[in-house]
Amino acid sequence: MPPRPQTIRVLCVDDHRIVRDGISLIIGRQADMEVVGVASSGETAIEQYRNLRPDITLMDLQLGSMNGVEAIREIHKLDPAARIVVLTMYQGDEDIFRAIEAGATTYLLKDMLSDDLVRVVREVHAGGHPVRPEVAAQLAARASGPTLTPREVQVMALVAQGMRNKEVGAALGISEETAHVHVRNILTKLKVNDRSAAVTVALRRGIIHLQ
């Protein structure tokens, strides 16, 4: 008999049980894979990784008090060689960049799971860094354009809540004029003419998210 293939040990992190169950079903059908642990929060994911040391971690980005990017960073402190595949509904270039910067190996949209999950897990386990063409294009586009500063991201999030410059200034402890300058710089960087268009672009790109 041929030797049994090495089993790829997978940790699944998602705050929705139906997603965890679905991924476990897909992985469980593969002769060379098994789900060795599940987690519904970033904190639990770190603890599970510490205890289980899986070959591959499948990580959602939206996890509550500690998001997926923060969990990825902490896992990489435990194990710089950790192989993490981000699973998310978001496809903005900022979401992709933050995940990759934190240490994710690659990025997979949840609506592509049935087609790509098993293949990507095998490729990453073999040492690959599979990146879909549209993901690579978004990263290239981000690298070629101006990015918002952390303060500008804060301002953008408040603008998305409907705050005017005076309210933004009060919330951040800055003057109304300084808030106005930040908004003007945001419009320039996002290549839009008004605040509503800036909110639309910021949400699409994943610069901010609605809570």
Image (tube, rainbow, N blue to C red):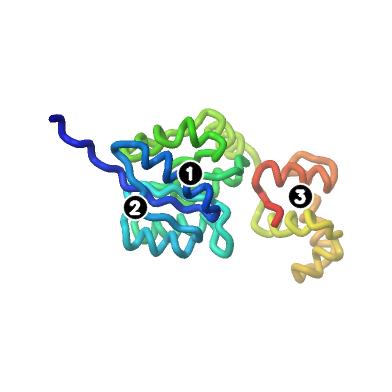
Q: Which residue is mark 3?
A: 185
Q: In this rendered view, identify the residue nearer to me: 148 or 154.
A: 154
Q: Indicate the quadrant containing the C terminus: top left, top right, bottom left or bottom right.
A: bottom right
The answer to which image quadrant residue 171 occupies is: bottom right
Q: In this rendered view, identify the residue nearer to me: 205 or 109.
A: 109
- Structural distance between the alpha carbons of marks 3 and 1: 44 Å
Query: Mark 2 or mark 3: which comes first in sequence?
Result: 2
In this image, 37 relative to 116: left or right? left
Q: Which residue is mark 2?
A: 36
Say if 14 sits above or below 141 in the image: below
Circle 1 Cα neighbour tier, 10 Å, few/some/many (<14 / 14–19 / ≥20): few
| Tag in front: 3 or 1 | 1
The answer to which image quadrant residue 97 occupies is: top right
Please, what secondary structure does the residue beneath circle 3 have? Answer: helix
- Rendered location of residue 160, percent (x, y): 78, 54
Amino acid at circle 1: Gly
Query: Mark 3 or mark 1: which comes first in sequence?
Result: 1
Circle 2 Cα neighbour tier, 10 Å, few/some/many (<14 / 14–19 / ≥20): some
Q: Which residue is mark 1?
A: 22
Residue drawn where x is 52% and y is 50% of the image: 60
- Rendered location of residue 53, percent (x, y): 31, 56
Q: Indicate the quadrant containing the N terminus: top left, top right, bottom left or bottom right.
A: top left
Amino acid at circle 2: Val
- Rendered location of residue 198, percent (x, y): 78, 45
The answer to which image quadrant residue 141 occupies is: top right
- Rendered location of residue 177, percent (x, y): 84, 62
